Image (tube, rainbow, N blue to C red):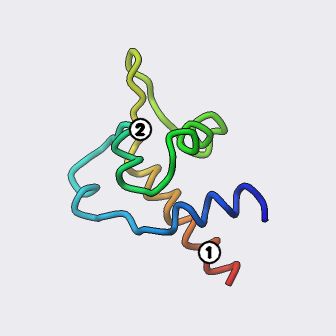
Amino acid sequence: MSDETVLMEELMQESLPADVLSHRRYLTKQELMELIPVSLSTINRLLKSGTLPFIKIGRRVLIPVSAVENLHGICEIATVADA
């Protein structure tokens, strides 16, 4: 099983709550960890690889909600394709 497959399975364990994402434009890494059941190191890997885009303001890393939603959609497609 590849690292990407394991990552997708981790992300798909829980769906993203629409009420939280509907009024936000950006999430911190901590907020993203609370939304999807992955570790900080997994989020950092996604950021470093460019899979998950981000902006940096000072020391603060902000992740666009739209990128999280796109990643979630990609994972759903991949999970269905693997079935």
- The amino acid pointed to by label 2 is Lys
In the image, what residue occupies the spot 45% across and 52% down?
Answer: 68
| 57 lies left or right of 67 | left
Q: What element carries label 2?
A: helix
Residue farthest to the top, as pictured: 58
Question: What percent of the width, then of the height, locates residue 61?
Answer: 42, 29
Q: How crowded is mark 2: few (under 14 residues within 10 Å), some or many (20 or more)?
A: some
Question: In the displayed structure, would residue 49 be above or below residue 55?
Answer: below
Q: Which mark is residue 22?
A: none
Mark 1 neighbour density, 10 Å: few (under 14) some (14–19) many (20 or more): some
Q: Is mark 1 on a helix, strand or loop?
A: helix
Q: Where is mark 1, residue-wise?
A: 79
The residue depicted at 59 percent of the width and 73 percent of the height is 77
Q: In which quarter of the image is residue 21?
A: bottom left
Residue extending farthest to the bottom is 83
- The residue type indicated by label 1 comes to Thr
Q: In which quadrant will I find the C terminus?
A: bottom right
Task: Work out which quarter of the rendered image holds the N terminus and state it.
Answer: bottom right
- Quadrant of residue 42 within the rendered picture: top right
Q: Residue at x 62, y 75 (%)?
A: 79
Q: Is residue 46 above or below residue 22?
A: above
Residue 17 lies, in percent from the top left, at: 30, 64
Q: Where is residue 75 in the image (x, y as percent from the top left)?
A: 57, 66
Q: Name the residue under label 2.
A: 29
Q: Which of 4 and 54 is in front in this view?
A: 4
Point out residue 52 in the picture as x, y percentages from the top left corner.
Answer: 55, 44
Residue 15 or residue 56, whichever sits in front: 15
> In screen coordinates, is 6 left or right of 36?
right
Q: Which of marks 2 and 1 is nearer the N terminus?
A: 2
Q: Is residue 66 toward the left or the right of residue 7 in the image? A: left
